[in-house]
Image: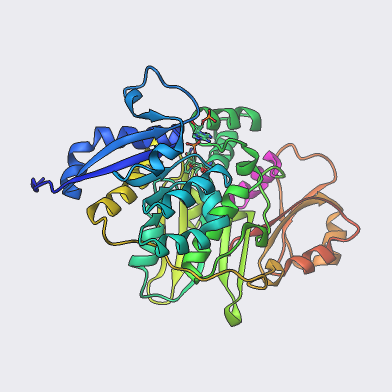
Amino acid sequence: EEIHEVNGMVNVAILGFGTVGSGVAEVLTTNGGLIDQRVENLVRLKYILDVRDFPDSPYRDCFVKDFGVIESDPEVDIVVETIGGATVALDFTTRALKAGKSVVSSNKELVATHGYELLQLAREHGVSYLFEASVGGGIPILRPLTSCLAANELSQVTGILNGTTNYILTRMIKAGLTFEQALKEAQENGYAERDPSADVDGHDACRKICILAALAFGQHVYPDQVPTQGIRGVTLADVAYADSCGYKIKLLGRAIREREGKLCAFVAPHLVPASNPLSGVEDVFNAISVTGNAIGDVMFYGRGAGKLPTASAVVADVIDIAKDLKTARCAVWGPGSRDLVVSSDILSSRWYVRGTASMDKVRAAFGEISPLARGGAPAGETAFLTAPMTEPQVRARLEGMELHSLIRVLE
Ligand code: NDP
Ligand code: HSE
Protein backbone atom coordinates (compact mmCIF):
# COMPACT_ATOMS: atom_id res chain seq x y z
CA GLU A 1 0.00 0.00 0.00
CA GLU A 2 1.16 3.53 -0.76
CA ILE A 3 2.72 5.27 2.24
CA HIS A 4 1.18 8.66 2.93
CA GLU A 5 2.48 11.40 5.13
CA VAL A 6 1.02 11.49 8.61
CA ASN A 7 -0.50 14.85 9.56
CA GLY A 8 -1.41 14.62 13.21
CA MET A 9 -2.88 12.59 16.02
CA VAL A 10 -6.47 11.38 16.43
CA ASN A 11 -7.27 10.20 19.96
CA VAL A 12 -9.90 7.57 20.61
CA ALA A 13 -11.62 6.55 23.85
CA ILE A 14 -13.54 3.28 24.16
CA LEU A 15 -16.44 3.11 26.62
CA GLY A 16 -17.11 -0.51 27.69
CA PHE A 17 -14.39 -3.14 27.33
CA GLY A 18 -16.64 -6.13 26.68
CA THR A 19 -16.99 -8.28 23.55
CA VAL A 20 -17.19 -5.39 21.07
CA GLY A 21 -15.07 -2.82 22.94
CA SER A 22 -12.17 -5.27 23.36
CA GLY A 23 -12.51 -6.17 19.66
CA VAL A 24 -12.24 -2.48 18.75
CA ALA A 25 -9.02 -2.17 20.78
CA GLU A 26 -7.66 -5.30 19.09
CA VAL A 27 -8.45 -4.12 15.55
CA LEU A 28 -7.06 -0.64 16.24
CA THR A 29 -3.83 -2.27 17.45
CA THR A 30 -3.48 -5.18 15.01
CA ASN A 31 -4.29 -3.06 11.97
CA GLY A 32 -2.84 0.16 13.39
CA GLY A 33 -0.24 0.62 10.66
CA LEU A 34 -2.63 0.37 7.76
CA ILE A 35 -5.28 2.41 9.60
CA ASP A 36 -2.79 5.26 10.10
CA GLN A 37 -1.87 5.10 6.41
CA ARG A 38 -5.48 5.18 5.30
CA VAL A 39 -6.39 8.00 7.67
CA GLU A 40 -3.16 9.91 7.06
CA ASN A 41 -3.15 10.62 10.80
CA LEU A 42 -1.94 8.63 13.80
CA VAL A 43 -5.01 7.02 15.36
CA ARG A 44 -4.20 6.42 19.03
CA LEU A 45 -6.22 4.58 21.64
CA LYS A 46 -5.94 6.94 24.60
CA TYR A 47 -8.56 5.74 27.09
CA ILE A 48 -10.71 2.74 27.88
CA LEU A 49 -13.54 3.21 30.36
CA ASP A 50 -14.94 0.19 32.16
CA VAL A 51 -16.35 -0.63 35.57
CA ARG A 52 -14.03 -3.62 35.93
CA ASP A 53 -10.24 -3.75 36.35
CA PHE A 54 -8.06 -5.36 33.69
CA PRO A 55 -4.58 -5.51 35.33
CA ASP A 56 -3.26 -8.08 32.84
CA SER A 57 -4.53 -6.36 29.70
CA PRO A 58 -1.96 -5.01 27.22
CA TYR A 59 -4.06 -1.82 27.34
CA ARG A 60 -3.87 -1.53 31.17
CA ASP A 61 -2.37 1.97 31.01
CA CYS A 62 -5.42 3.23 29.10
CA PHE A 63 -8.06 2.30 31.69
CA VAL A 64 -10.08 4.91 33.56
CA LYS A 65 -13.21 4.61 35.67
CA ASP A 66 -14.46 8.20 35.50
CA PHE A 67 -16.09 9.32 32.25
CA GLY A 68 -15.31 12.90 33.28
CA VAL A 69 -11.63 12.27 32.44
CA ILE A 70 -12.55 11.53 28.82
CA GLU A 71 -15.20 14.23 28.62
CA SER A 72 -12.85 16.95 29.81
CA ASP A 73 -9.77 15.91 27.82
CA PRO A 74 -9.61 18.20 24.75
CA GLU A 75 -7.29 15.71 23.05
CA VAL A 76 -10.07 13.09 22.73
CA ASP A 77 -11.59 13.36 19.27
CA ILE A 78 -13.66 10.17 18.98
CA VAL A 79 -15.58 8.30 21.66
CA VAL A 80 -16.56 4.69 20.88
CA GLU A 81 -19.63 3.67 22.88
CA THR A 82 -19.81 -0.11 23.32
CA ILE A 83 -21.45 -0.30 26.74
CA GLY A 84 -24.97 -1.02 25.51
CA GLY A 85 -28.40 -0.12 26.90
CA ALA A 86 -30.08 3.25 26.91
CA THR A 87 -29.26 4.62 30.37
CA VAL A 88 -25.58 5.24 31.11
CA ALA A 89 -24.80 4.97 27.36
CA LEU A 90 -27.29 7.78 26.68
CA ASP A 91 -25.72 9.96 29.38
CA PHE A 92 -22.14 9.40 28.12
CA THR A 93 -23.10 9.82 24.45
CA THR A 94 -24.93 13.06 25.15
CA ARG A 95 -22.04 14.42 27.21
CA ALA A 96 -19.45 13.40 24.60
CA LEU A 97 -21.38 15.09 21.77
CA LYS A 98 -21.88 18.23 23.87
CA ALA A 99 -18.15 18.25 24.59
CA GLY A 100 -17.53 18.40 20.83
CA LYS A 101 -16.41 14.79 20.41
CA SER A 102 -17.64 12.52 17.63
CA VAL A 103 -19.28 9.31 18.78
CA VAL A 104 -19.23 5.87 17.15
CA SER A 105 -21.62 3.28 18.54
CA SER A 106 -22.63 -0.36 18.18
CA ASN A 107 -25.62 0.20 20.46
CA LYS A 108 -28.84 -0.38 18.52
CA GLU A 109 -31.04 0.02 21.58
CA LEU A 110 -29.76 3.55 22.05
CA VAL A 111 -30.03 4.47 18.36
CA ALA A 112 -33.53 2.98 18.01
CA THR A 113 -34.83 4.80 21.06
CA HIS A 114 -32.88 8.11 20.98
CA GLY A 115 -31.29 8.24 17.50
CA TYR A 116 -33.25 11.26 16.28
CA GLU A 117 -32.31 13.51 19.21
CA LEU A 118 -28.68 12.30 19.31
CA LEU A 119 -28.25 12.99 15.58
CA GLN A 120 -29.68 16.49 16.11
CA LEU A 121 -27.33 17.04 19.04
CA ALA A 122 -24.35 15.89 16.95
CA ARG A 123 -25.30 18.31 14.18
CA GLU A 124 -25.72 21.19 16.65
CA HIS A 125 -22.19 20.58 17.91
CA GLY A 126 -20.66 20.00 14.46
CA VAL A 127 -19.55 16.46 15.21
CA SER A 128 -20.33 12.99 13.84
CA TYR A 129 -22.56 10.27 15.27
CA LEU A 130 -22.07 7.01 13.37
CA PHE A 131 -23.40 3.53 14.18
CA GLU A 132 -22.68 1.17 11.27
CA ALA A 133 -22.15 -1.75 13.69
CA SER A 134 -25.61 -1.34 15.24
CA VAL A 135 -27.27 -3.28 12.40
CA GLY A 136 -25.91 -6.48 10.88
CA GLY A 137 -22.70 -6.62 12.98
CA GLY A 138 -19.87 -6.55 10.44
CA ILE A 139 -22.08 -6.20 7.36
CA PRO A 140 -21.76 -2.87 5.59
CA ILE A 141 -25.44 -1.90 5.38
CA LEU A 142 -26.22 1.54 6.81
CA ARG A 143 -23.72 3.48 4.71
CA PRO A 144 -24.61 1.57 1.50
CA LEU A 145 -28.30 2.13 2.22
CA THR A 146 -27.87 5.89 2.48
CA SER A 147 -25.01 6.39 -0.01
CA CYS A 148 -24.87 3.65 -2.63
CA LEU A 149 -28.66 3.35 -2.89
CA ALA A 150 -29.33 7.09 -2.60
CA ALA A 151 -30.67 7.26 -6.16
CA ASN A 152 -33.57 4.93 -5.36
CA GLU A 153 -36.99 5.26 -3.88
CA LEU A 154 -36.91 2.29 -1.53
CA SER A 155 -40.02 0.20 -1.04
CA GLN A 156 -38.97 -2.59 1.25
CA VAL A 157 -36.29 -3.76 3.68
CA THR A 158 -36.39 -7.36 4.89
CA GLY A 159 -33.68 -8.99 6.94
CA ILE A 160 -32.38 -11.73 9.13
CA LEU A 161 -31.19 -9.23 11.70
CA ASN A 162 -30.26 -11.26 14.75
CA GLY A 163 -27.23 -13.53 14.81
CA THR A 164 -28.10 -15.27 18.07
CA THR A 165 -31.53 -16.52 16.98
CA ASN A 166 -30.30 -17.52 13.54
CA TYR A 167 -27.45 -19.41 15.23
CA ILE A 168 -29.87 -21.11 17.64
CA LEU A 169 -32.25 -22.16 14.85
CA THR A 170 -29.36 -23.51 12.74
CA ARG A 171 -27.73 -25.44 15.62
CA MET A 172 -31.04 -26.94 16.74
CA ILE A 173 -31.79 -28.14 13.22
CA LYS A 174 -28.32 -29.15 12.02
CA ALA A 175 -26.68 -30.42 15.23
CA GLY A 176 -29.80 -31.52 17.11
CA LEU A 177 -29.02 -29.24 20.08
CA THR A 178 -31.74 -28.19 22.49
CA PHE A 179 -32.74 -24.54 22.57
CA GLU A 180 -30.85 -24.09 25.87
CA GLN A 181 -27.66 -25.72 24.53
CA ALA A 182 -27.72 -23.62 21.37
CA LEU A 183 -28.32 -20.40 23.34
CA LYS A 184 -25.43 -21.26 25.68
CA GLU A 185 -23.11 -21.66 22.66
CA ALA A 186 -24.27 -18.32 21.25
CA GLN A 187 -23.53 -16.67 24.60
CA GLU A 188 -20.08 -18.31 24.79
CA ASN A 189 -19.33 -17.00 21.29
CA GLY A 190 -20.18 -13.44 22.41
CA TYR A 191 -23.21 -13.15 20.10
CA ALA A 192 -26.01 -12.72 22.62
CA GLU A 193 -27.22 -9.58 24.34
CA ARG A 194 -26.57 -9.20 28.08
CA ASP A 195 -30.19 -10.28 28.59
CA PRO A 196 -30.60 -12.88 25.82
CA SER A 197 -34.39 -12.54 25.87
CA ALA A 198 -33.72 -9.40 23.79
CA ASP A 199 -32.50 -11.79 21.07
CA VAL A 200 -34.93 -14.66 21.61
CA ASP A 201 -38.05 -12.50 21.89
CA GLY A 202 -37.20 -10.40 18.84
CA HIS A 203 -36.50 -7.04 20.54
CA ASP A 204 -32.97 -6.82 19.12
CA ALA A 205 -34.25 -7.43 15.57
CA CYS A 206 -36.99 -4.88 16.28
CA ARG A 207 -34.42 -2.21 17.20
CA LYS A 208 -32.50 -2.96 14.02
CA ILE A 209 -35.51 -2.77 11.71
CA CYS A 210 -36.35 0.59 13.38
CA ILE A 211 -32.90 1.92 12.41
CA LEU A 212 -33.13 0.51 8.87
CA ALA A 213 -36.63 1.94 8.44
CA ALA A 214 -35.55 5.38 9.66
CA LEU A 215 -32.69 5.44 7.15
CA ALA A 216 -34.71 3.95 4.28
CA PHE A 217 -37.91 5.94 4.75
CA GLY A 218 -36.74 9.09 6.52
CA GLN A 219 -38.65 9.13 9.82
CA HIS A 220 -37.76 7.84 13.26
CA VAL A 221 -39.53 4.58 14.05
CA TYR A 222 -39.76 3.66 17.74
CA PRO A 223 -39.48 0.02 18.89
CA ASP A 224 -42.86 0.20 20.66
CA GLN A 225 -44.51 0.95 17.29
CA VAL A 226 -43.27 -2.33 15.79
CA PRO A 227 -45.20 -5.54 16.62
CA THR A 228 -42.54 -8.05 17.62
CA GLN A 229 -42.57 -11.81 17.93
CA GLY A 230 -39.48 -13.94 18.60
CA ILE A 231 -38.59 -17.59 18.12
CA ARG A 232 -39.85 -19.09 21.40
CA GLY A 233 -42.96 -20.51 19.72
CA VAL A 234 -41.04 -22.20 16.88
CA THR A 235 -40.78 -25.98 17.40
CA LEU A 236 -38.81 -28.70 15.64
CA ALA A 237 -42.20 -30.00 14.38
CA ASP A 238 -42.69 -26.67 12.56
CA VAL A 239 -39.14 -26.89 11.18
CA ALA A 240 -39.85 -30.42 9.87
CA TYR A 241 -43.13 -29.40 8.20
CA ALA A 242 -41.47 -26.34 6.65
CA ASP A 243 -38.62 -28.51 5.38
CA SER A 244 -41.08 -30.98 3.85
CA CYS A 245 -42.29 -28.30 1.43
CA GLY A 246 -38.94 -26.60 0.72
CA TYR A 247 -39.05 -23.77 3.27
CA LYS A 248 -36.78 -22.67 6.12
CA ILE A 249 -38.04 -20.88 9.22
CA LYS A 250 -36.27 -17.55 9.75
CA LEU A 251 -36.87 -14.65 12.12
CA LEU A 252 -37.34 -11.62 9.87
CA GLY A 253 -37.53 -7.91 10.48
CA ARG A 254 -39.56 -6.21 7.77
CA ALA A 255 -40.33 -2.61 6.83
CA ILE A 256 -42.58 -1.99 3.84
CA ARG A 257 -43.55 1.38 2.42
CA GLU A 258 -47.32 1.75 2.21
CA ARG A 259 -49.52 4.43 0.64
CA GLU A 260 -49.66 8.02 1.96
CA GLY A 261 -46.23 7.81 3.57
CA LYS A 262 -47.25 5.06 5.99
CA LEU A 263 -45.02 2.18 6.92
CA CYS A 264 -45.72 -1.42 7.80
CA ALA A 265 -42.99 -2.68 10.13
CA PHE A 266 -42.87 -5.85 12.19
CA VAL A 267 -40.69 -8.72 13.42
CA ALA A 268 -41.87 -12.32 13.20
CA PRO A 269 -40.74 -15.81 12.20
CA HIS A 270 -41.47 -16.56 8.54
CA LEU A 271 -41.37 -19.57 6.24
CA VAL A 272 -38.81 -18.59 3.59
CA PRO A 273 -38.83 -20.49 0.27
CA ALA A 274 -35.62 -22.16 -0.92
CA SER A 275 -35.71 -19.86 -3.97
CA ASN A 276 -35.12 -16.82 -1.71
CA PRO A 277 -31.42 -16.38 -0.76
CA LEU A 278 -32.49 -15.52 2.81
CA SER A 279 -33.34 -19.21 3.28
CA GLY A 280 -29.65 -20.19 2.97
CA VAL A 281 -28.42 -17.73 5.63
CA GLU A 282 -27.21 -19.85 8.55
CA ASP A 283 -25.38 -19.72 11.90
CA VAL A 284 -24.44 -16.22 13.05
CA PHE A 285 -24.77 -14.79 9.54
CA ASN A 286 -27.31 -12.06 8.81
CA ALA A 287 -28.64 -10.84 5.48
CA ILE A 288 -30.62 -7.77 4.55
CA SER A 289 -32.59 -7.52 1.33
CA VAL A 290 -33.49 -4.04 0.08
CA THR A 291 -35.81 -3.21 -2.82
CA GLY A 292 -35.43 0.05 -4.73
CA ASN A 293 -37.17 1.39 -7.84
CA ALA A 294 -33.93 1.60 -9.85
CA ILE A 295 -31.82 -1.25 -8.47
CA GLY A 296 -34.56 -3.82 -7.93
CA ASP A 297 -33.50 -6.24 -5.18
CA VAL A 298 -30.08 -6.06 -3.54
CA MET A 299 -28.81 -8.16 -0.65
CA PHE A 300 -26.15 -7.58 2.01
CA TYR A 301 -24.69 -10.64 3.75
CA GLY A 302 -22.12 -11.35 6.44
CA ARG A 303 -21.47 -12.04 10.11
CA GLY A 304 -24.18 -10.39 12.13
CA ALA A 305 -22.49 -10.56 15.56
CA GLY A 306 -19.20 -11.40 17.26
CA LYS A 307 -16.16 -9.55 18.54
CA LEU A 308 -14.02 -8.89 15.46
CA PRO A 309 -16.73 -8.66 12.76
CA THR A 310 -18.54 -6.04 14.84
CA ALA A 311 -15.28 -4.26 15.62
CA SER A 312 -14.61 -4.15 11.87
CA ALA A 313 -17.72 -1.97 11.40
CA VAL A 314 -16.98 0.19 14.47
CA VAL A 315 -13.40 0.88 13.40
CA ALA A 316 -14.55 1.68 9.86
CA ASP A 317 -16.66 4.48 11.36
CA VAL A 318 -13.66 5.63 13.42
CA ILE A 319 -11.56 5.73 10.25
CA ASP A 320 -14.23 7.64 8.37
CA ILE A 321 -14.31 10.34 11.06
CA ALA A 322 -10.53 10.38 11.63
CA LYS A 323 -9.85 11.05 7.94
CA ASP A 324 -11.40 14.48 8.28
CA LEU A 325 -12.25 15.58 11.80
CA LYS A 326 -13.55 18.93 10.61
CA THR A 327 -16.39 17.51 8.51
CA ALA A 328 -19.30 16.12 10.53
CA ARG A 329 -20.97 12.99 9.22
CA CYS A 330 -24.46 12.21 10.40
CA ALA A 331 -27.41 10.35 8.97
CA VAL A 332 -30.48 12.49 8.56
CA TRP A 333 -34.01 11.44 9.34
CA GLY A 334 -37.09 13.22 10.58
CA PRO A 335 -38.93 12.92 13.89
CA GLY A 336 -41.25 9.98 14.46
CA SER A 337 -45.01 10.19 14.57
CA ARG A 338 -47.48 8.01 16.40
CA ASP A 339 -49.55 7.23 13.26
CA LEU A 340 -46.58 6.38 10.99
CA VAL A 341 -46.69 2.59 11.37
CA VAL A 342 -49.72 0.67 10.15
CA SER A 343 -50.64 -2.88 11.17
CA SER A 344 -49.31 -5.87 9.25
CA ASP A 345 -52.96 -7.05 9.23
CA ILE A 346 -53.22 -5.43 5.79
CA LEU A 347 -50.52 -7.69 4.29
CA SER A 348 -51.77 -10.68 2.36
CA SER A 349 -49.60 -13.81 2.23
CA ARG A 350 -49.83 -17.57 2.44
CA TRP A 351 -49.79 -18.99 5.99
CA TYR A 352 -48.37 -22.12 7.58
CA VAL A 353 -50.81 -23.59 10.10
CA ARG A 354 -50.25 -26.45 12.57
CA GLY A 355 -53.04 -27.56 14.85
CA THR A 356 -55.39 -30.30 15.84
CA ALA A 357 -58.33 -30.58 13.47
CA SER A 358 -59.65 -32.97 10.84
CA MET A 359 -58.72 -32.26 7.21
CA ASP A 360 -62.46 -32.12 6.42
CA LYS A 361 -62.94 -29.31 8.90
CA VAL A 362 -59.83 -27.52 7.57
CA ARG A 363 -61.04 -27.79 3.96
CA ALA A 364 -64.53 -26.61 4.91
CA ALA A 365 -63.01 -23.49 6.48
CA PHE A 366 -60.20 -22.78 4.00
CA GLY A 367 -61.18 -24.34 0.68
CA GLU A 368 -57.99 -25.07 -1.27
CA ILE A 369 -54.96 -25.75 1.00
CA SER A 370 -51.62 -27.58 0.63
CA PRO A 371 -51.52 -30.37 3.26
CA LEU A 372 -48.13 -31.12 4.88
CA ALA A 373 -46.74 -34.32 6.41
CA ARG A 374 -43.88 -35.24 8.72
CA GLY A 375 -42.61 -38.47 10.26
CA GLY A 376 -43.66 -39.10 13.87
CA ALA A 377 -46.58 -36.67 13.90
CA PRO A 378 -49.01 -37.40 16.76
CA ALA A 379 -52.52 -38.56 15.88
CA GLY A 380 -54.85 -35.68 15.05
CA GLU A 381 -52.03 -33.22 14.17
CA THR A 382 -52.75 -31.29 11.01
CA ALA A 383 -50.43 -28.95 9.14
CA PHE A 384 -51.03 -27.09 5.91
CA LEU A 385 -50.29 -23.97 3.84
CA THR A 386 -53.19 -21.65 3.06
CA ALA A 387 -53.91 -19.58 -0.04
CA PRO A 388 -52.89 -15.88 0.24
CA MET A 389 -54.94 -13.99 2.83
CA THR A 390 -54.51 -11.49 5.67
CA GLU A 391 -53.92 -12.47 9.29
CA PRO A 392 -57.46 -11.50 10.42
CA GLN A 393 -58.85 -13.67 7.58
CA VAL A 394 -56.75 -16.70 8.55
CA ARG A 395 -57.61 -16.30 12.24
CA ALA A 396 -61.34 -16.06 11.47
CA ARG A 397 -61.17 -19.35 9.55
CA LEU A 398 -59.27 -21.01 12.39
CA GLU A 399 -61.95 -20.26 14.97
CA GLY A 400 -62.98 -23.39 16.86
CA MET A 401 -59.77 -25.27 15.89
CA GLU A 402 -56.92 -26.03 18.30
CA LEU A 403 -54.05 -23.93 16.94
CA HIS A 404 -50.39 -24.67 17.75
CA SER A 405 -48.49 -22.59 15.18
CA LEU A 406 -49.35 -19.86 12.72
CA ILE A 407 -46.43 -18.54 10.67
CA ARG A 408 -46.46 -16.16 7.70
CA VAL A 409 -44.92 -17.36 4.42
CA LEU A 410 -42.53 -14.88 2.76
CA GLU A 411 -43.71 -14.40 -0.82
P1 NDP B 1 -20.59 -6.60 26.82
O1 NDP B 1 -21.54 -6.78 27.96
O2 NDP B 1 -19.68 -7.69 26.46
O3 NDP B 1 -19.71 -5.29 27.04
C1 NDP B 1 -20.15 -4.14 27.72
C2 NDP B 1 -19.02 -3.67 28.61
O4 NDP B 1 -19.37 -2.41 29.19
C3 NDP B 1 -18.74 -4.64 29.78
O5 NDP B 1 -17.34 -4.80 29.95
C4 NDP B 1 -19.37 -3.93 30.95
O6 NDP B 1 -18.80 -4.28 32.20
C5 NDP B 1 -19.08 -2.49 30.60
N1 NDP B 1 -19.90 -1.54 31.33
C6 NDP B 1 -21.13 -1.72 31.86
N2 NDP B 1 -21.54 -0.59 32.48
C7 NDP B 1 -20.54 0.29 32.34
C8 NDP B 1 -20.34 1.63 32.79
N3 NDP B 1 -21.26 2.28 33.49
N4 NDP B 1 -19.18 2.24 32.47
C9 NDP B 1 -18.23 1.59 31.78
N5 NDP B 1 -18.35 0.32 31.34
C10 NDP B 1 -19.49 -0.31 31.62
O7 NDP B 1 -21.49 -6.19 25.58
P2 NDP B 1 -21.12 -6.33 24.02
O8 NDP B 1 -19.74 -5.91 23.78
O9 NDP B 1 -21.58 -7.63 23.53
O10 NDP B 1 -22.14 -5.26 23.40
C11 NDP B 1 -21.91 -3.87 23.53
C12 NDP B 1 -22.92 -3.14 22.65
O11 NDP B 1 -22.72 -3.54 21.28
C13 NDP B 1 -24.38 -3.48 22.95
O12 NDP B 1 -25.16 -2.35 22.66
C14 NDP B 1 -24.70 -4.59 21.96
O13 NDP B 1 -26.07 -4.66 21.67
C15 NDP B 1 -23.92 -4.13 20.77
N6 NDP B 1 -23.53 -5.14 19.80
C16 NDP B 1 -23.01 -6.34 20.22
C17 NDP B 1 -22.59 -7.26 19.30
C18 NDP B 1 -22.00 -8.58 19.69
O14 NDP B 1 -21.76 -9.41 18.81
N7 NDP B 1 -21.75 -8.83 20.97
C19 NDP B 1 -22.71 -7.01 17.86
C20 NDP B 1 -23.25 -5.72 17.52
C21 NDP B 1 -23.65 -4.83 18.47
P3 NDP B 1 -19.52 -5.44 33.07
O15 NDP B 1 -19.52 -6.68 32.22
O16 NDP B 1 -18.71 -5.57 34.29
O17 NDP B 1 -20.91 -4.95 33.34
N1 HSE C 1 -27.15 -9.96 19.99
C1 HSE C 1 -27.01 -9.45 18.67
C2 HSE C 1 -27.21 -10.56 17.68
C3 HSE C 1 -25.64 -8.86 18.50
O1 HSE C 1 -27.17 -11.74 18.09
O2 HSE C 1 -27.46 -10.30 16.51
C4 HSE C 1 -25.45 -8.18 17.16
O3 HSE C 1 -26.20 -7.01 17.07
Given residues 336 and 31, the one toward you in this image is: 336
Given residues 68 and 266, the one toward you in this image is: 68
**Figure check: 180 above or below 239:** above
Asked whether, in this view, residue 24 is left or right of residue 92, the answer is left
Residue 142: image quadrant is: bottom left
In the rendered image, the residue lying farthest to the bottom is: 260
x, y percentage for residue 404?
A: 79, 48
State yes or no: residue 239 in magenta. yes
State yes or no: residue 361 in magenta. no
In the rendered image, the residue lying farthest to the right is: 400
Quarter of the image with the C terminus is bottom right
Quarter of the image with the N terminus is top left
**Figure check: 393 above or below 189:** below
Given residues 248 and 118, the one toward you in this image is: 118
Is residue 119 visible in the rendered structure shown here? yes
**Figure check: 31 above or below 202:** above
x, y percentage for residue 3?
A: 8, 45
Residue 49: image quadrant is: top left
Is residue 158 visible in the rendered structure shown here? no
x, y percentage for residue 135?
A: 47, 52
Q: Give the range drawn in magenta.
A: 234-251
Asked whether, in this view, residue 187 is left or right of residue 331, the answer is right
Q: Residue at x 50, y 29 (%)?
A: 51
Q: How is the image coloured?
A: rainbow
x, y percentage for residue 270?
A: 62, 55
